[in-house]
Amino acid sequence: MPLLAKRLDLIQPSPSVSAMNRAKTLAAAGEDICNMAAGEPDFPTPPHIVEAAARAMRDGATRYTATDGTAALKNAIAAKFERENHLAVTTANISVASGAKQIIYNAFTCTINAGDEVIVPAPYWVSYPDIVKLNGGVPVFVTAPAEQRFKMTQQQLADALTPRTKWLVLNSPNNPSGAIYSEGELRGFAQVLRDHPQVHVMTDDIYEHLIYDGLVHSTFAHVNPDLADRTLTINGVSKTYAMTGFRIGYASGPVELIKAMEKLQSQSTSNPAAVSQAAAVAALNGPLSFFAEWRNAYKMRRDRVVALLHGKAGLDCPTPDGAFYAYVSCATQIGKTTLGGKLIKDDSDFVMYLLDDFKVATVQGAAYGISPAFRISFATSMDVIEKACHRIIHACKALR
Ligand SMILES: Cc1ncc(COP(=O)(O)O)c(C=O)c1O
């Protein structure tokens, strides 16, 4: 009898986590790696949050807490949803987990039966389809290419819906493309969904503050209040507050679902780490003024990446509206051969070539559902960006 369960064959290790780990291992071995694979802010966690965590530990935040979040954190989250997203929610609507990823995991595990469909617009964050599959569901991909500015249309949504559709996943700003749905587009999706009362909406808003050029973030449940009772609004402290290692994500949604997620979590992690919850309270109740400087830095880096790559050596790098990734088409590089005689068959080959021959770590588009492309994270210093982009151009020019 094999040790491992069959369902594990349904999923892959997270490609972005793998790429980041590979880059870190090579760098630790002394290689001069430009790491453009990381999905986390390079800024340090703001000191007032770190201080609050240290203080909380000294004050006894070292024990189990309530299963899906302390009262203090749930209150801070309810206040945040009201202040920033104009959602009127009570603590009964709120769930806290060890990262937004666990929130997504909990929500799908609590709701998906074998064969249930989940609409996932592509390009998508790598974990949605695999968590759906692990739970016996079927991801239904809707392709939203660069020509559509990486955004699903209302008609595409209407065409993808079936009586088996359980969830629609919306991620705005999007990882990996940076695409942002406007208020009007969110209203359009709601118009379609009103005829399909069995469909719930999972909106992953984790990059909500990473928006450039004066664009604004719209929250689905605020824009479409009549659908709020079938929307799970997901967020977390990882990206906004540079707190990836604290592992705190949260959501607001219908009480029935929130309670089910609590039940599931009581049999998995018991609760998110007490000290991390205390740090998240300090983050959400504290100032966000520091973020203007971060956003400005990300914007300058974004502009530099686009200036260095777009239209150069056959690359197509559309300007992302949000998040800290650029999704670059490498279509013109496919079918070419490296100096060492290796054929670049697809974007996975291209990304391996960038890493092996030019020491630049990126992630292949195949992981995100739109190929041939690669994802660059610009959550890194301007020096690394300059060096990496020059290496990428050099790599493209060296192909025959
Ligand atoms: C779109 C998206 N959602 C969720 C997450 C997970 O965030 P967390 O650190 O809260 O688990 C990420 C992390 O990369 C992400 O890009």
Image (tube, helix red, strand yellow):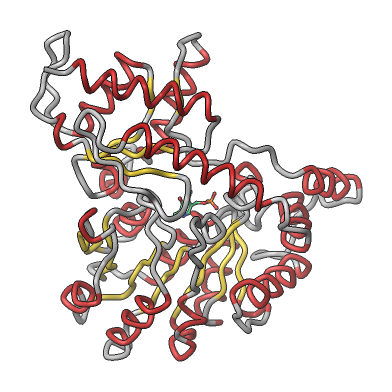
Going by the image, does 44 lie left or right of 27? Answer: right
Q: Position of residue 225 (x, y in %)?
A: 49, 88
Corner quadrant of residue 297: top right
Q: Position of residue 169 (x, y in %)?
A: 36, 67
Which residue sits at x=52%, y=38%? 379
Q: Position of residue 155 (x, y in %)?
A: 19, 77
Going by the image, does 172 lie left or right of 240? Answer: left
* Residue found at the very far left of the displayed protein: 335
Corner quadrant of residue 66: bottom right
Q: Position of residue 365 (x, y in %)?
A: 26, 41
Going by the image, does 347 lie left or right of 266? Answer: left
Corner quadrant of residue 250: bottom right
* Residue found at the very far right of the displayed protein: 59
Which residue sits at x=63%, y=84%? 88
Q: How many marks?
A: 0
Which residue sits at x=31%, y=75%? 166
Q: Is residue 1 visible?
A: no
Q: Is residue 46 above or below residue 201?
A: above
Q: Is residue 81 visible?
A: yes
